[in-house]
Image (cartoon, coloured by chain):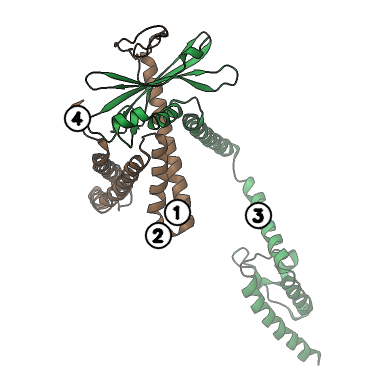
Chain colours: A green, B brown
Amino acid sequence: MTCTFLRAVQYAEKLHRSSGSRLLLPHFVFNKACFTTEPSLRWGLREQKKMVRPGSFYEVAQKTVWTQGPRPQKAEDSGKQVSVRRGQRGETAIPTTQKVKEAGRDFSYLIVVLIGISITGGLFYVIFKELFSSSSPSKIYGKALEKCRTHPEVISFFGEPVRGYGEMTRRGRRHRVSFIEYVKDGLNYTRVKFYIEGSEPGKQGTVHVEVKENPKNGEYEFRYIFVEVESYPRRTIIIEDNRFQDN
Amino acid sequence: MEEYAREPCPWRIVDDCGGAFTMGVIGGGVFQAIKGFRNAPIGIQHRLRGSVNAVRIRAPQIGGSFAVWGGLFSTIDCGLVRIRGKEDPWNSITSGALTGAVLAARSGPLAMVGSAMMGGILLALIEGVGILLTRYTAQQFRNAPPFLEDPSQLPPKEGTPATSYPSYQQYH
């Protein structure tokens, strides 16, 4: 009676174990008890082949059921156990000189990364200052060009639409404007020079702009804007003249 | 200068396309030569043959993709100049972003946005380098102090205008 019962348990346990081993194959089960009683669940690590004795069926069945029960935690635990054991086994194998070398290498990588980040940050700062700060020559050029475009004398002379551009760089792009910054009586002045052209062919003009820094709010205000036309006779179109606002 | 008497814009597209292709072929050729050399079996003859094969197959492809990038960038740039009517650094950044977006159009809108951001940031960095270079090389020629009087094309506060020119001592 007990023999048939034990045999039934054995078959059930074998079924459990086969399905369990398929499911538990990716996980290492390192329970101490399992080392001795679950030879089929260990693979590759120990070659201990122990036959499951009939006397230990109950414990075997219980252990199989238990390992299949809370599977996620068991997997994590066995994972942690694996890493801890691996770490413990591995640390004694790495000598100190190699650790120092690795630390040195990591440190040099960190230095390289920091240098790269600082250079990139510097470039971004420069480009933001050029594009967004109201004291940059590009902004001054943009505002002055808008004022030129709406001036009736300029429109009548050059024809609409009026295009503006700066100095020619080597690649043929003309987005740089020429400018000078100087300080007089403690205030910052900037002079900008760019060129305009209209739809009338052959008529090219040079625009000279000067801005002065307002000491109260730090804003830059136009001091004068005038257009110099390269035709014969030379003509000067004065768009704005605020020099009387000085002193 | 006489050679710049014609408008740079339509011709700049061909210029940039060709320049980008050359850069791609030369750079890609060097990299593929080294890669083909290293990935070939041992024996100098095998390695040389592997290197030549890699260059022959991949370098024109790399050059072609660079040329497409450069040509598209220049086209969009010239288009923006035409629309806005002025040339300034914003054109480059916007062109870079749009080029990135167009070239990633096959991969869907999210990839287009990411590619546009990368193109814009890359162009912004290149612009920043250009600005730094021009400013700091021009500072070498700065004499001190610059002139401080008003230019003579403007009527002086009391009298009549004259016709001589101020001298700009540096160009940026």
Q: Which residue is mark 4?
A: B3
Q: Which residue is mark 3?
A: A83
Mark 2 secondary-structure assignment: helix
Please say whether residue A197 is visible from this viewpoint: no
Please say whether residue A56 is visible from this viewpoint: yes
Residue B168 versus residue A75: which sits nearer the camera? B168
Select label 4 or label 1 by which is in front.
Answer: 4
Select label 2 or label 4 by which is in front.
Answer: 4
Labels 4 and 3 within one chain: no
Identify which amino acid the numbered label 1 is placed on.
Met
Label 1 crowd (10 A; few <14 / some 14-19 / many >=20): many
Mark 1 secondary-structure assignment: helix
Select label 3 or label 2 by which is in front.
Answer: 2
Residue A13 rendering spot, x and y as whole percentages: 71, 81
Q: Which residue is mark 1?
A: B112
Looking at the image, residue A213 sits to the left or right of residue A208; the answer is right
Residue depicted at 33% across the width and 34% down the height: A162
Select label 4 or label 3 by which is in front.
Answer: 4
| Quarter of the N terminus of chain B within the rendering | top left
Labels 2 and 1 within one chain: yes
Label 4 crowd (10 A; few <14 / some 14-19 / many >=20): few
Residue A186 rendering spot, x and y as whole percentages: 53, 10
Q: Which residue is mark 2?
A: B106
Looking at the image, residue A22 sits to the left or right of residue B50; the answer is right
Cα gap from disc 2 to disc 4, whole angstroms: 40 Å
In the displayed structure, would residue A39 be above or below residue B135?
below
Q: On the image, which quarter does residue B158 sit in?
A: top left
